[in-house]
Image: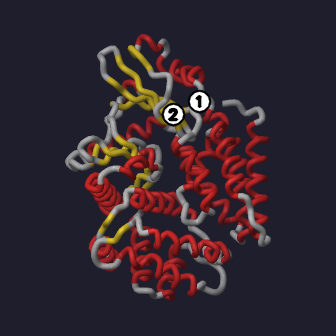
Amino acid sequence: MRDRGRTRRLMGLGARTGGALLKTRLGGQADWQSLGEALFEGLSELKGPAMKLAQIMSQWDDLLPPDLAEELSRLQRQAEPMPWPRIREALVMQYGELDSRFRDIEERPFASASMGQVHKAVTHEGETVVLKVQYPGLADVLESDLKQVRRIMGLGRWFKVPQARLDALFEELAAGLRDELDYRAEADAMARYRERYQADSRLVIPEPLFELSGQHVLAMRFVDGTPLRDLESADDDTRQKVAVALADWITEELFTYGELHADPHAGNFAADEQGRLVIYDFGAVIPVPEARLNAMMQLLEATLAHDPMAMDEALVQMGGRQGQGAPLSLYRESAACVAPLFAPGEQDFSDVRVHRRLRELTPKVWAAMDRLQPPAETLLLSRALNGHYWNLVRLKARLDMHSRAQPLLEWARKA
């Protein structure tokens, strides 16, 4: 990756994004599809933190204009791979002469993303492995890119988000991106999760190969599977089986182990031939303190009770509401959107009426941003839970969220 011209292009994309936001703010109609196409083309080539931020944005597709959300989601499905000669440079830095370690390496990646891409390889012993290769030079341009991301995030001032809050949000995002560059830490997390869930026959976590891994290359045993994003056309039994496993796993992560896999990108999950949930990527695993879980459950209980004053109190305690005047009518409408998913009995996550109501709330949420501001320490947590919600939507999950939530709400009351 080269720094020359990179800053200029990122600034240009940021200016174009800002112009669209300003036009909307002033009552005009922005060309969101054109902006999305420009972001896809520019960020797909540039890779790095700015592309990662766009992928994160795309997972909040209930808050984005549909045309923009669709174009940004392409960054998760169709990002242009980095040419093989550049990837080969990174592999040679890790292994030296490649022929001495591998019988064959596929030059065409079978997955590419913001921070790296994935290639299959075959060892001299005949074992198929996966090499997750960090883009060459990414660490060198990270801080430069983050400066431009900070400038782009500064657009939040137009929505009356205080600079101190923007700075805190930026630091949370930056820390997560820096952590994702450490492939040794990811290998450790993968090994920890394998041991933790070895008795759960519904989950498959690839084995990291420490002897072939380093700071910028993560090697693991190959586990085949159909990506979650391609399961929408799978048979209903498979989808429901995967959805239940995903929901159970997230709950156990949070409430038993106090951790969460915080990158819900649909490409990080798959189903194998037995219908088991395969979890590939562990570059973003965050701790979730018990106090934060308790506050989240208090907010949920207030929401399900349609109690706007209690919702406001929970948000204030979480640091998510500042300023004067609680937006009580917005709380009431939000509760009316969310509560049906927690009604007794199975609820259908593919019910478009729920998504339509959430999208209709978006302008009101933006209008209340002078009072509703996401706590920085919950940025990655909120992103992960929102992304997993949309993964359940893609799976057309039918879950009894009422029965699932009751013991968790009871736990929070006792805590």
Measured as percent of width and height from the top left, residue 98 is found at 46, 14
Q: Looking at the picture, does residue 229 appear above or below residue 3? A: below
Residue type at mark 2 is: Gln
Looking at the image, tell me whether mark 2 or mark 1 is earlier in sequence order.
1
* Mark identifier at residue 117: 2
Q: Residues within 10 Å of mark 1 (few under 14, many from 20)?
A: many
Q: Against 257, is 106 above or below?
A: above
Instruction: Give the residue drawn at x 43%, y 62%.
Output: 389
Q: How far is the residue under mark 2 from the one under mark 1? A: 8 Å
| Residue 249 appears in the figure | no
- Disc 1 element: loop
Residue 82: image tag: 1
Q: Residue at x 33, y 50 (%)?
A: 234
Q: Are marks 2 and 1 in contact (CB under 8 Å)?
A: yes
The circle on residue 43 is: none
Using the image, determine if residue 220 lies above or below residue 205.
above
* Residue for point 66% across, 38% down: 46
Name the amino acid, label 1: Met
Which quadrant of the view contains residue 268? top left
Place residue 42 in its image quadrant: top right
In depth, the one of 110 and 247 nearer the eye is 110
